[in-house]
Amino acid sequence: MAKTVEIVEVSPRDGIQNEKTLLPTEIKLELIERAVAAGVRRLEATSFVNPKRVPQMADADEVARRLPRGTGARYVGLVLNPRGFERARAAGIDEINFVIVATETFNRRNQGVAVGETLAAWHEIAALTRQAGMRAGVTIGASFGCPFEGEVPVERVVTLARQLAEAGPHEIALADTIGAAAPSDIRRKIEAVRDALPGMPLRCHLHNTRNTGLANAVAAIEAGAVSLDSSIGGVGGCPFAPAATGNIPTEDLVYMLDRMGIETGLDLDGLIETAAWLGRQLAISPPGMLHRAGRFPPPAADAQVSAAG
Ligand code: ZN
C-alpha cells in the first residue's frame, strides 16, 4: 500500500456549491488560505460555469485572481466548455478539471448534451490547455452509480477512460458522485482502469452519502489511486440526492490515514479548526465527525507524554 497520498481539497468548489448560504468572496478566500496554511498543496478553487446555474460560483474569476500565491499550492478550476477554459486561463488558474458523466441521462442533465458531444468538448479543452502550457485532468462523474440509470458497468467506465486518455490528460479521476459505491466496487473499477491505462495517475472523488466514504478511500488507495478529493468538514451535498451529505471530510480522512502511517502532509489541528469555522460561516454543523470528537490521542495527552519524557 502507498506510503503517501495526495489530498485535493475541494471544499471551495464541490463543498460549498450546493450549500444554501452564499459565501462572500472574502470568506471563500479565507477558506482557501486556511486550507493552504494547514498544508493543502492542491485545491479545487472554483468552477467557471454559468453563474445562473451555480450561483455560489458567480465570483469564480475574482476568487481565482486573488488566490494566495507563493505557497507552493496549485489551484484547479472546473471547466466544462471553451468559454469556461478561457475564463480560467485569463484568471491565472494552474490546472483544469473537466467533467464528463458516465451515463447519457445524467450527462445530459448536468452538461445539457450527449456524452459524445462532451467527449468532443474534452478533446478541444485538452488541446487548448496544452497550448496554454497548463495541465488538464478529467473526472468521470457517476462512475459508480447513476441516479437516473442505476448501475454503471465496469466496461462503460473503462471505455470512457480510454477515449478520454487519447487527449493526453495528466490524470483521470473516477467520481462516486452520488455516494453509491462500496469498497469492492471502488477496487474493481480503479483496477480495471489502471490495467487499461498503465502509468496514468488516478484520482478518486468520493461522497459520503451512504456512509461508505472512508472505507472507499482505503479501497481506492489499495487499488492504486494516488490522489483523493475531500472537503473540510465534509460539507456539501448533491443536487441529485437531496438528503445527501457532502464529500468525504478532509480531517476525518487525514486522521485515519495518519494512523495508518500514510503521509498526506496536512495538519490535523488546522483542518479541525477550519471545519468548525466553516460550519459557522455556513450556519450548519458540518457532517464530518473529527471536529466534534477531537483527535486521539488528544493534544493535551501528547503534551503530558512529552512532559513525562
Ligand atoms: Zn462531487
Image (cartoon, rainbow, N blue to C red):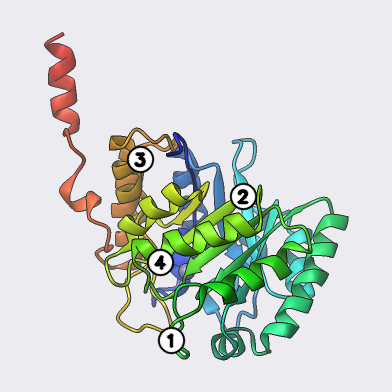
On the image, numbered disc 3 is attached to which residue? 270
On the image, numbered disc 1 is attached to which residue? 150
Percent x, y of residue 224: 50, 48
Q: Quadrant of the N terminus?
A: top left
The numbered mark at residue 185 is 4
Tell whether 308 sits left or right of 77.
left
- As helix, strand or loop, the secondary structure at mark 4 comes to helix
On the image, numbered disc 2 is attached to which residue? 201
The numbered mark at residue 21 is none
Q: CA distance from mark 2 to mark 4?
A: 19 Å
Q: Is residue 107 above or below residue 39?
A: below
N-term mark: 2 or 1:
1
Q: Quadrant of the C terminus?
A: top left
- As helix, strand or loop, the secondary structure at mark 1 comes to loop
Q: CA distance from mark 2 to mark 1?
A: 27 Å
Q: CA distance from mark 1 to mark 3?
A: 39 Å
Amino acid carrying label 1: it is Gly
Mark in the foreground, 1 or 3: 1
